[in-house]
Amino acid sequence: MNLKKTLIAAMGAAVLAAPLVAAPVLSSTAEAAAEQFFPMIIYRTGAYAVGGIPLANGYGDYLKLLNARDGGINGVKIKFEECETQYSTKVGVECYEKLKGKGDVGPTVFNPNSTGITYAIIPKASVDKVPVHSMGYGRTAAGDGRVFPWAFTFPTSYWSQAAAFINYIGEREGGKNNLKGKKIAFIYHNSGYGKEPLPTFNKLAKKYGYDFKALAVDHPGQEQKAAWLQVRRYKPDYVFLTGWGVMNQVAIKEAAAIRFPMDHFIGNWWSGAEPDVLPAGKTAIGYIAATFNQPGAGTQAHADIVKHVYGGDAAAAKKGQIGQVLYNRGIINAIYDTEAVRTAMGKYGNKAMSGEQVRWGLENLNLTEARLGELGVKGFMGPISVSCKDHEGGGKVMFQQWSGTEWKIVKGWTDTMQDVIRPMIEEAAAAYAKENKITPRAC
Amino acid sequence: MFRQNGSFAKTMEVLNAIFVLPFVDMFTEPVFFAEVVVGGLLTGVMYSLVALGFVLIFKASGVFNFAQGAMVLFAALTLVGLMEKGVPVWLALIIAAGVMVIVAVVIEKLVLRPLVNQPDIILFMATIGITFFLEGFGETVWGSDIHRLDVGIPDATFEIGGMLLNEFDIWAAAIGAAMVAFLALFFRYTVIGRALRAVADDHQAALSVGIPLKTIWIVVWSVAGFVGLVAGIMWGTKSGVQFSLSLIALKALPVLILGGFTSIPGAIVGGLIIGVGEKVAEIYWGPLIGGAIENWFAYMLALAFLLFRPQGLFGEKIIERV
Amino acid sequence: MLYRESGQYKTSYTDDQAIFPLKQDRWLMAIALVIAFVVIPLTSSEYMLEAVIIPFLIFALAAIGLNLLAGYCGQISLGTGGFMAVGGYTAYKLTTSLPDMNMIIVFLLSGVAAAFVGIMFGIPSLRIKGFYLAVATLAAQFFLQWLFNKVEWFYNYNPSGTITAPPREMFGFVVTGPHATAEARYMITLVVVAVLALVAKNLTRGHIGRSWMAIRDMDIAAEIIGIRPLHAKLSAFAISSFYCGVAGSLFVFTWLGSVETEAFNINLSFQVLFMVIIGGLGSILGSFIGAAFITAVPILLTNAPQFFGFNLPIDLQKHFEVMIFGVLIIFFVIVEPHGLARLWQITKEKLRLWPFPY
């Protein structure tokens, strides 16, 4: 019996293991030049990899572009490190702990890329003095900068998106007053993420008098026949979808199967990318989804990425999913973050920015049309200004439609009823502050 | 007893909502009810397709093969990967099936043989190891992207008597039925099938009459691999082939305990019961308590059946001796 | 040479029945406790505590809970995540409605709540056995997850549906919430886990543990010799769920800080089951070893390529990691089907004779 050998091997492994577990701590100390460190909490594997890969590619490629084309941000080189979460909150927290100690002056800003991870690290980040930017996901209440100084949700939030959706269909019906008596079905991922828009829909239902039915679909959402049978009976005028991963693909197929008119089927901005519509083939034509960035690879920034990051190899860039909806969203996330660093440098000087300085930069971020033009992304994304109080930026939302081969914007920047949404955000933030004994800062 | 009239009325209202209104609803809209039932049946067949793989392996080797979901994913990934490389469908199917045989051989050699005679739970744990390996391996080879799968099964919607049906679902049902019939005949009339049944009854007795256990196991795992391939095609066509395919195993588990771990017809009947049960419950009772009850309801339903038949509907009676 | 019992004479029954009858074991235990209570908090980095040691302790507690049920009483459960959720949400409700309640009491009470839920979902075990029961306990998992997601009362009606650990103090230290230092959270976790592990060890040695083991080994035979399956099985479910519940409350309050129901999903149940099986069914030590294996190995594998200077693409690295993890599970199951704890036991036996085995 070679048990002895096994034992020795096991012990040897254990001895080897000890430094490995501690490895990230050891390696975090010795660095050479001061670089701007971007931690990337991403997922390229697991059940949601389909969405995670293009997001990570877009974000990473833009950072690479800045390094290759401009030599970093204002001359400060960018360094980044990916940490794979498989979309699991537990692994995400481990990633956060691992990355927060890295970088010459600490990490720049965390983009958790998952609502669950966002919830978990917002409280931690405020103590560790690292900003968290959950771009269009996460805790909507974090749009109130007085309670959440370290968390940012701009350019917009799920609640604003729901309001934009009501605005959009109101317009299609010839005025929001015509929504009275219309029926809207809301199919949502049965999780914190999916439930977010519910209060907004309920509130607006009272205001505009539409009939509203919410249908939950459990993770992962491979089987949703029951929900769609109910849609079939309810005969809604519009269906709004809040899904992620496999749920989107199945929902679009099921909608087609009950012959629901695709142009009345509208997804949120995480339910409207190429992987969501492609498996459904032709039946998905006409499907509409919200977005806050232009589809396609037509901007100067995209051309530069092909040139500098992929060495002019357009095919490789295409393989890297350039121009896809979620890839583009990765790019604008990177633009927000790097521009925030630039803003911070405007105040603190051209050196590597610490988390606290970046926080100031995020809070004072003001991306004008002119600035977007300089970045080569004019029209690609909306101008935005963040303030101490407003971490959501009150951003507007667009709607895009799937033509069978590409996404096309069918409705430009749509208003998000901040007069209704903002008080709701502030109320939710106040409740959070009370429960967690946070004194809101004055703004 | 009911001095407070208000609360009495309230109680009656709740009882009414639970025990009367859903049935009224079913009878006033019979066409829709029929559609729900048919939809449930068709979904149930899809569950059965996955459950069948579990049953085959449990029947012949007593292993609760948690890796069935991963095998579905792996088979579908292989198929779709080959098709994307330009291999014609029929050839890709054959190659994918061949790959599943290789998987079966490797599993038998490296995992099952060293674990002969170990407790069930240990074998179960080993199959979880296989799950991890197959998931990682499949993704390494074929990537984590979503792959569109179209093997040419028609996918149009048509209407019968006010009910909206999908050709694809009908095909799935037909394929499921054909597979069960085939497996039942295979088990009944072929030499290997008889040997399989012998092994299922008693490993040692089977060995002592000269049935080669190794071969049988390889055959069974290969067949489970084919079943996984079919399940992967059906589910993968619906949602695209992607990692979450391996999660559908969870949908098959209630079917499995309801039908019995050891019964092939049980997998089908169990699938149908679960399919109809969860759809009817979700649509008629779900709204009362907030919806999305399908997942746990399937398990509760299976549990309710188990309380009366602890070995599942068609499982072999568990005989215990001291 | 160092580890042997010769020369240690027991002069009373109490001595004979002690948890650690050997002097060396007592020493080892004492050293382990000193390391846990003094050395680790003084020397560990925040990352070590947050990402490795605190989760290890919490998972060890949950694994002990499941081990009491699966390893000692033979009832396999896949509802661990659900029972942990009961603990987590109860603790949240308790401490938000009664902010002055001592956190230790909150943790224990959430365990009690989980115990009641556990008894309810344990009832089918009187009739259903083996894998049928294992799958049936998934009903608990899915139902509880649905319940905490659906009923807004559980998360105080906040729109995001998450629960966040509010700041609470003990002995003048902040022990939960974002401002609690990793050390403070580690210490409170450690105290709870150490005490409960000791209790578990004693439970399994006493009357109740023996009745569980009798049921596990052959329930009909146990019934014939006068053990009531109802009492034994339901008490196993209750106590196991109690442990899981406490682990769940720690999971929220001393580790993650803020969770949604999804954190208690079925993967958590499976993870704890892996720990129990890899560590060793029917062994308290095994629960610790299993928890260490399952929490540390993935982190190790993630950091390994970097440590050795490989720079693989992160997705490939993760795929390899998953594959290696799978292979390791198979490897250990084949090498030692009785779990890693068994390896330690064999080592001890060899040590007693070393260096003169015969």
Image (cartoon, grey):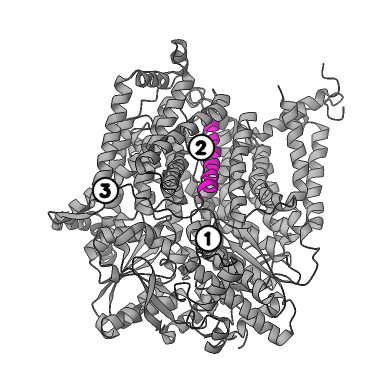
Give the amino acid type for the residue marked by disc 2 in the picture: Ile
Give the amino acid type for the residue marked by disc 3 in the picture: Asp
Q: Is the N terminus of chain A in the top left, top right, bottom left or bottom right quadrant?
A: top right
Q: Residue furthest front?
A: A312
Classify mark 2: residues with Cα within 10 Å, few (<14), some (14-19) or many (20+). Answer: many
Give the structural element (helix, strand or loop) at label 2.
loop
Residue C96 vertical placement versus B210 (above, below): below
The disc numbered 2 marks a residue on which chain? C
Residue identified by numbered label 3 = B169
Residue under the image location 26 percent in, 48 percent down: B169
Residue identified by numbered label 2 = C76
Do pointers 3 and 1 mark residues of a single chain? no
The disc numbered 3 marks a residue on which chain? B
> Which stretch did the figure color magenta?
B121-146
Q: Does residue C353 appear left or right of residue B281 in this picture? A: right
Q: CA distance from mark 3 to mark 1?
A: 31 Å
Q: Quadrant of residue C333?
A: top right
Q: CA distance from mark 3 to mark 2?
A: 36 Å
Q: Which mark, by number, is residue A53?
A: 1
Confirm or deny contact between disc 2 and disc 1 (CB under 8 A).
Answer: no
The disc numbered 1 marks a residue on which chain? A
